[in-house]
């Protein structure tokens, strides 16, 4: 069996698919290791997941004020490639797998310079910048979409988006998260590092809808719409919120909801437990988030990040809405429409329909299919 190095990092959308694939490969008898930015989120996640990690420097492929690459970042990227090359020359893995994002580039380019097999995973419908730099030397590219703009279809293999295909019994998940059995459970997550916009907008919206007691009043409305939640539970009409703020914003959000017993703000959350108890989620629209929601059958209210590259989050969210699995609320429209969307999606009938549609979108077995592709190209 071989050592397979996962070159990844930066955000959870790049890291967690690598973790899911690593676990699949380990179950098949391979050794795995995550290679990413020293001190980055990927190092913390690897430690939490019990996975081996090797850190290198990684420069962000950002632009300076003059519209040119920042030379300091290019220097760090070059140092990272040299560090990764030294490490890979010693370990000689069977393959290096790149998941996109600036932190993956040193490992992939170093592997290609050594003649080691590289395989890429592209999670979006448009080939990302780091993947465009690496694709020419890659043996294969696994994709989450049938068609990826900027990628020759002959080089693409549709595998889906690898996610942690683990569900937790509801009672166990509720206990782990300190939540009650009965109220409608809304999960709020702005990505692995949180979203300042959602952190500011969502608590005020939900406070307006549910009040200090966490109950939907009979006359409650948003935008003139009134909805009977009508869900089975010990507190009919009640709600509880689990809000993953990201550690940077936790203190501010916690301070703002300290008077709401039904609103729990946490810096990080056990994602498997959270998705296992969520009846409805308010999220951004990264591919990894959408894939996890689909696996768990959780209806979504999606607020796409307007600054996402080529506005890909908006297009991701529209696809989910068209499938009947969620509702898109553009960030500019949040003040007037988020509350209405919550009321509409929380109602029992629409929520059940969206749950079935979400499960229908799930690409179950994606980690296994991507592992198959990797194994075909091992040295």
Image (cartoon, rainbow, N blue to C red):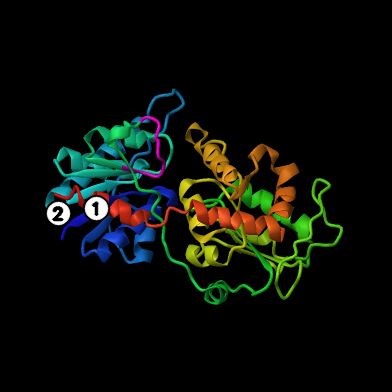
Q: In the picture provided, is 112 more to the left or to the right than 158?
A: left
The foreground one among 335 and 245 is: 335
Q: Position of residue 93 (x, y in %)?
A: 17, 52
- Name, please, the residue furthest toward the right: 219
User: Of helix, strand and loop, which mostly describes the magenta segment?
Assistant: loop
Q: Which residues are magenta?
A: 142-150
User: According to the image, label 1 marks what residue?
Assistant: 5
* Residue neighbourhood size for the residue with mark 1, other residues' Cα within 10 Å, grouped as few (<14), some (14–19), many (≥20): many
Q: Relative to 88, does residue 45 appear above or below in the rendering? A: below
Residue occupying image coordinates x 78% and y 67%: 213
Residue occupying image coordinates x 32% and y 57%: 368
Image quarter where the N terminus lies is: bottom left
Q: In the picture provided, is 119 more to the left or to the right than 204?
A: left
Q: Which numbered disc covers residue 91? A: 2
Residue occupying image coordinates x 54% and y 41%: 319
Q: In the picture provided, is 363 more to the left or to the right than 36?
A: right
Q: Which numbered disc covers residue 138? A: none
The foreground one among 142 and 352 is: 352
The foreground one among 378 and 268 is: 378
Q: Position of residue 256 (x, y in %)?
A: 69, 58
Q: Position of residue 78 (x, y in %)?
A: 26, 37
Question: Which SS class for mark 2?
Answer: helix
Question: Which SS class for mark 1?
Answer: strand
Q: Position of residue 246 (x, y in %)?
A: 53, 56
Whether residue 149 is in magenta: the answer is yes
Q: Earlier in the sequence, mark 2 or mark 1?
A: 1
Q: Relative to 292, does residue 74 appear above or below in the rendering? A: above
């Amino acid at each position: 069996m071989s050592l397979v190095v996962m070159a990844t990092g930066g955000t959870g959308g790049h890291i967690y698919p690598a973790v899911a694939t690593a676990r699949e490969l380990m179950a098949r008898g391979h050794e795995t290791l995550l290679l990413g930015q020293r001190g980055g989120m990927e190092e913390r996640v690897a430690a939490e997941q019990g996975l081996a990690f090797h850190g290198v420097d990684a420069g962000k492929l950002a632009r300076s004020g003059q519209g040119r690459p920042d030379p300091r970042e290019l220097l760090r990227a070059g140092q990272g490639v040299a560090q990764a090359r030294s490490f890979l020359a010693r370990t000689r893995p069977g393959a290096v797998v790149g998941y996109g994002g600036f932190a993956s580039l040193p490992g992939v380019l170093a592997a290609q310079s050594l003649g080691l097999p590289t395989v890429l995973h592209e999670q979006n419908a448009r080939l990302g910048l780091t993947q465009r730099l690496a694709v020419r030397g890659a043996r294969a590219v696994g994709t989450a979409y049938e068609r990826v703009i900027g990628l020759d279809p002959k080089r693409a293999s549709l595998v889906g988006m690898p996610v942690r295909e683990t569900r937790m019994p509801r009672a166990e998940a509720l206990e782990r998260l300190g939540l009650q059995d009965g109220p409608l459970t809304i999960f709020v997550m702005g990505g692995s590092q949180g979203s300042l916009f959602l952190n500011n907008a969502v608590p005020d919206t939900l406070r307006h809808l549910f009040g200090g007691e966490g109950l939907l009043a009979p006359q409650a409305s948003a935008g003139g719409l009134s909805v009977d939640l009508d869900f089975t539970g010990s507190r009919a009409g009640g709600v509880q919120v689990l809000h993953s703020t990201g550690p940077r914003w936790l203190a501010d959000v916690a301070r703002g909801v300290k008077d709401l017993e039904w609103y729990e703000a946490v810096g990080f959350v056990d994602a498997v437990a959270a998705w296992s108890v969520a009846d409805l989620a308010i999220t951004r629209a990264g591919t990894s988030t959408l894939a996890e929601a689909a696996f768990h059958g959780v209806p979504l209210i999606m607020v796409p990040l307007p600054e996402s590259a080529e506005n890909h989050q908006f297009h991701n969210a529209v696809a989910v809405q068209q499938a009947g699995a969620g509702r898109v609320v553009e960030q500019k429209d949040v003040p007037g429409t988020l509350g209405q969307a919550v009321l509409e999606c929380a109602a029992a009938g629409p929520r059940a329909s969206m749950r079935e549609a979400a499960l229908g979108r799930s690409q179950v077995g994606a980690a296994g299919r991507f592992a198959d592709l990797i194994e075909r190209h091992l040295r």
